[in-house]
Image (cartoon, rainbow, N blue to C red):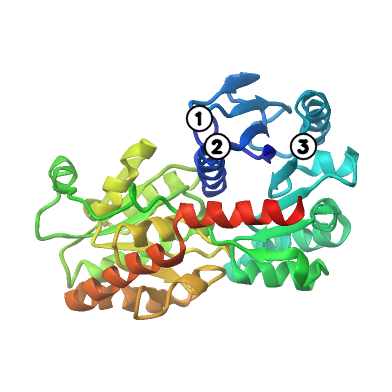
Amino acid sequence: MKLCVFAKGLPHSHIKGGMEIHTYELIRRLSTKGLDITVITTKHPQNLKFEILEEGIEVFYVGDISLKYTPKFYLESWKLFEKLHFKKEFDIIHSQSIAGFGFVKYGPKNMPFVVTSHGTTVNEFRSALNSKEILKIFNGMLLALRYFFNSTEKKSFLRANKIIAVSKDLAQIIKEFYKVPSKKLIVIHNGVDHHKFRPRDASHIRLKLRIDPDEKIILLLGRILKEKGFHLVLRILPKLVTTYKVKVVIVGDGPYLDVLKKLAKDLKISAHVVFLGKVPHELIPLYYNLADIVVLPSQRVEGLPLVLLEAMASEKPVVASKIGGITEVIHHMKDGILVDPRSLKDLENGIRLLLEDEALARYISKNARRKILEGYTVDYMVEKTIEVYKSIL
């Protein structure tokens, strides 16, 4: 089977994010199943035009801006696809999000076409409303107008033979707001490598960071954006440190990092916060194992965050916002703690619960990894994706 994948980016060449990691894990595993895979993605940061990955996957870089969908990307990606298809004769075209809109706009209407949706404009609008900030709500209204007048998402969904949604919540949004028939939609949750993300010893990392053995570690990990809500944990930290020996470790970088550092200084909690910046991806599993608690205080309505699945696979108790696809994975008080994304008090109580009750934390941790093994592994995700391909060939 010859597969052409349109993608926003890949983690080895672009900034690492959930969708980029999802795409790479999917194509890498599909290649081991015997699929011949070609990827067309956005401009390489160092202007590389082509490369072959270790797995034999061919990657082509086009467009004018890295990690951006632009008219030039859509046009160039389509023209490149035409040339490649003439030589290879692809069997399936798979678009990650709207990366394949160039194919939708200019391409034939009879080729098997699959879209994986990680989120929609409607999700962004809901996230803006959650923020309760005037500017964000205004921007959310602009997003709503874009939903009604910009046909990029609509046309992609209507053209697709099958739409893979990474959560039930997202599938429902696509069905209701984009008027997509149920028979087109299938839910395939994001999957993680449970061999890579597993319980392991990380005591040497604790020693390296000079964190006392009796200090509890709260881990925040991911791209540092305001909508990720990391600042909310810092705001409740002054109360937590009066009762517990606790340290917040923040892994990642992004445009909101300097704001977090200033906030920690203003709140006089800098001694209780460790900013590690960007960490090599191969070391991320160790940092999950450093944590006593992983917190996802997201204000953004996401499809299904990989950080959540990776933490659970690492057998760590998670406190996460009751929002988007997160609620499909976590059964409150069984394999995680769900909190109101608009309530600082709820977030504080959720963290306190795990700090005070070690038996509960262990119970949740064990159940969390079991949940991943039962239906959120990357192997399961790949097998279900292949079934989608076969169903439309």
Residue 223 at x, y percent in the picture? 47, 47
* Amino acid under disc 3: Thr
Q: Is residue 280 above or below residue 196?
A: above
Q: Is residue 77 above or below residue 231?
A: above
Check disc 2 and report the residue beneath it: 31
- Which SS class for mark 3? loop
* First-in-chain label (2 vs 3): 2
Does the residue at mark 2 contact the one at mark 3 (Cβ under 8 Å)? Answer: no
Does the residue at mark 2 contact the one at mark 1 (Cβ under 8 Å)? Answer: yes
- Tell me if mark 2 has few (under 14), some (14-19) or many (20+) residues whose alpha carbon lies within 10 angstroms of its own: some
- Tell me if mark 3 has few (under 14), some (14-19) or many (20+) residues whose alpha carbon lies within 10 angstroms of its own: some
**Left or right: 19 as drawn, with respect to 138:** left
* Amino acid under disc 1: Glu
**Left or right: 354 as drawn, with respect to 74:** left
Check disc 1 and report the residue beneath it: 55
Q: Residue at x 14, y 59 (%)?
A: 215
User: Marks 1 and 3, how far apart in space?
Assistant: 29 Å
* First-in-chain label (2 vs 1): 2
Q: Nearer the viewer, residue 268 or 84?
A: 84
Q: Is residue 210 above or below residue 306?
A: above
Which quadrant holds the N terminus?
top right
Check disc 3 and report the residue beneath it: 70
Q: Residue furthest left?
A: 213
User: Marks 2 and 1, how far apart in space?
Assistant: 7 Å
Q: Residue at x 23, y 55 (%)?
A: 272
